[in-house]
Amino acid sequence: MADEAKTKQQGLQQAASVIFALVAVVPLLIFAWTLHALGAIRSTQAQLSLGVALAVALLGFWMFRSLLGRMAEVVQALAAALEQASRVRRTPARPRQHAGARCRGRDARTDGGQGERRRRGIHQASAGRAVGSATGGGPRRSSG
């Protein structure tokens, strides 16, 4: 996959270089043709201006290629970081167990809550009395 990304980036770099070269070379050719058509290409000033324009175009081409190379490195680093982040996100998380079930090695949801009551010390037989005495309705005494 990394080789495929590199070939894509090299293809994009080459395409961008061709486009830049055409954008820089075509105006220079038009300028040179205009100077030739006017008969001014023999003057030293026209030749110097044509040479300076060519030098500036070559300098711009070199700067463009170096900038494009740096941007390709940044894009590769970003793609690698995103790929690593997506791998981390794809790892399945372990299902969470009830706190009491981890201690006893069984799932507390399957025993109807009995494990939690046992842990608290409330048995099923005394559960009703504990609730009744808490609400004031404890065992009835005979009034007589």
Image: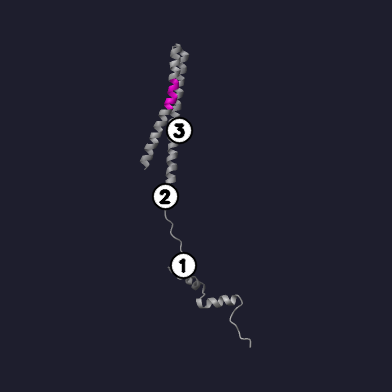
Q: Which mark is residue 67?
A: 3
- Of labels 3 and 1, the one closer to you: 1
Q: Residues within 10 Å of mark 3 (few under 14, many from 20)?
A: few
Q: Quadrant of the N terminus?
A: top left
Magenta stretch: includes residue 87? no
Q: Residue sitting at 44 percent across and 45 percent down?
A: 82
* Foreground pick, 126 / 86: 126
Q: Residue sitting at 43 percent across and 28 percent down?
A: 20
SS state under label 2 = helix
The residue labelled by disc 2 is: 87
Q: Which residues are magenta?
A: 20-28
The residue sitting at the right extreme is: 144
The kind of residue tagged 2 is: Arg
The answer to which of marks 3 and 2 sits earlier in the sequence is 3
Q: Which mark is residue 109?
A: 1
C-alpha distance separating marks 1 and 2? 32 Å
Residue 70 rendering spot, x and y as whole percentages? 44, 36
